[in-house]
Image (spheres, rainbow, N blue to C red):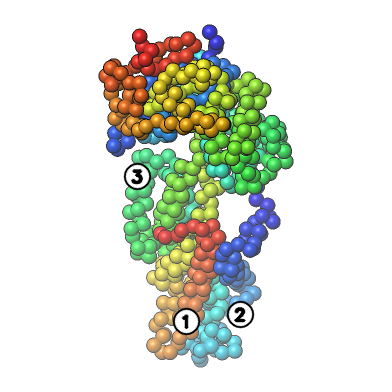
Amino acid sequence: MVESVVRLEDVSVHYYTFTGVVKAVDRVTLDIPRGEFVSFVGESGSGKSTLALALLRLVPPPGRIVSGRIVFNGMDLLSLPEQKMRELRGKSISMVFQDPMTSLDPVRKVGEQIADVYIEHGVTTDMEEALKLAREALEMVGIPGDRVNYYPHQLSGGQRQRVLIAAAVALKPSLLIADEPTTALDVIVQAKIMDLLEDLMRELKMSVILITHDIALAAERSDRIAVMYAGRVVEYGPVDAIIENPLHPYTRGLLESAPDLWGEKRIKGIPGNPPDLRNPPRGCPFHPRCPRRFDPCDKDEPGYVKVDDRIVSCHLYTR
Amino acid sequence: MPTISGITQQIFGRKPGRGLLLTGLAIILAFVILAVLAPWIAPYGPTERSVPSSLAASPQPPDRNHIMGTTELGYDVFSRIVWGTRIVLYVVAFSAILSMAIGVPLGLVSGFYGGKLDRILSMVMDSIYAFPGIVLALAVASVLGPSPTNAAISLSVVYVPTFFRMVRGQVLEVRESLYVEAAEALGYPNTHIMLYHVLPNVAPTILVVFGLAATDAILTEAGLAFFGLTVSYPSPDWGLDLRVGLRYLDQGAWWATLFPGIVITLLALGFALVGEGLGERYAIRTER
């Protein structure tokens, strides 16, 4: 049994909106092994970003983590006082956001924004010293150190994402969450940023959680993949097994929707739309769109089944 | 840190609103010079009888020695305007700075934390805002009693809600920005986020509101002075001179009201131009 950096137990996050309760994350249970690269894939609204925010306890109102445990390095994050949680953010768990163009404060120099991490987390009280560390952090992510005096608008999108990564890994966190870090960037830059994440992961012995809708990207980079649908993790396991032999019909559908390099395959897509999470269908949330649904699917919700080293939530495997 | 050259670049650089900004600053600077150098610029003291007593019973029209004429007591109108600049600038600067010092932190905290505090503060500010400025200032000033400092305080009461509303509105917008979310994810405390991320991003708005509030304060100050709530005659204040001069208007003494009126308008114009110039430069909407 590999040691895990984060274990989610029965985590649910609901948004209490005027039109009803949205179950954005619904009873998710899984282990993230230490030192691994784990991707959460799913379409928009599947709950993957909310899950990432829940790990930092930063789900914005009207959202709330309503149940479950998030065990990080032996601590239950959900029962920590806010002050303690704040100290963990940026120090032990960090996050890189989707849009590097707006994730940096436009009126402050990038060096100062990285230096803040050292000062606010008590590494040093001296701005000069902090700026020196910021310079080193910039060099670590492949940006010349003298860029500390640049303002965000003087950098390109890829460089800004590097600056954000530098701030996020400045204190060598044990877990880095990257929420669609490359969606706003072009493909070449995307590959370079992903390379950087992998290098940093090895260098700093971090675990990385990548949130993405790009299953090809996830397949290329991760050790494990968690497929999310309607707030549920429908399949979770080692990347090779999932790509070669998807167990859940939704995973299969996702893979069949991705184009291949030779263009021989016909892209299929999945008919229908994701369900309304205020009022998800009874039984398995995927059953209205599932090509392989059968008797129990619209009545009972499938639990998690262990198949080899994967878990899957589907009635095909419950017996 | 902003450097000197950075600041000059901000003000004089070829950016939108440059002409408005420079004209406004020039007007204000001229009045500041008048105030500081009053003893050397004004040919007479503000309450000096500057004409032979045989002529003192009625206002004298402008001539070679009195370029803006004299009042009924023989005071030189130009000298009184120059000396009056001191009172006007004191009251206006004091009130604008005081209302900024109160309105900005309240707006910042209120917008950032939201919730009950925000609702209560917004309601209080909106009720103050509902009064016409001059009426509210008159009421507060009459309670506090006539003095330049009291006048400044009563003007502040009027302009605190202006700062509060504009700052709060901007904070609500900045608070939703991704860089604030990113700062939260890096574990920064709220005070850090407010001081280093929110405040600098609403700073241009504060400057613009400062210009607008100061413009309005000049006119309202003149109103207070008109009703004798700043200094007492014969101390010089433009608004007060306007009222005293009014009595002699039907005798044809247009100079005793025209010139104080012009300088009030001119100084207000100066601040308005600065406010407009900054607004144009930073593309800030100033519907109030």
Which of pointers 2 and 1 indicates the residue nearer the eye?
A: 1
Q: Between marks 2 and 1, how big is the CA–CA gap?
A: 20 Å
Do circles 3 and 2 both sit on a common chain? Answer: yes
Residue type, label 2: Pro
Percent position of residue B143, x then y: 36, 59
Q: Residue at x 43, y 11 (%)?
A: A306
The disc at residue B258 is 1
Q: Secondary structure at mark 1?
A: helix
Q: Nearer the viewer, residue A60 or A203?
A: A203
Q: Chain of mark 2?
A: B
Q: Position of residue A126 (x, y in %)?
A: 67, 34
Instruction: Measure the alpha-carbon separation of dots 3 and 2.
Output: 54 Å
In this rendered view, identify the residue nearer to me: B265 or B166: B166
Circle 1: is it few (<14), some (14-19), or many (20+) Cα within 10 Å? some
Which chain does the numbered disc 1 sit on?
Answer: B
> Dot 3 lies on which element?
helix
Residue at the bottom extreme, as displayed? B54
Residue B105 higher or lower than A53, as above or below: below
Which residue is painted at 33% across and 60% down in the image?
B131
- Write the residue at 53% across / 8% down: A1
Q: Is residue A250 visible?
A: yes
Disc 2 and disc 1 in contact, CB within 8 angstroms: no
On the image, the x and y values in percent for residue B158 come to 40, 58
- Quadrant for residue A51, please give it: top left
Q: Which residue is mark 3?
A: B120
Lower sequence index among marks 1 and 3: 3
Residue type marked 3: Ile
Task: Tell me: A78 left or right of A92.
Answer: left
Tags 2 and 1 both on a single chain: yes
- Residue, disc 2: B43
Q: Chain of mark 3?
A: B
Q: On the rendered image, what quadrant is the C terminus of chain B found in?
A: bottom left
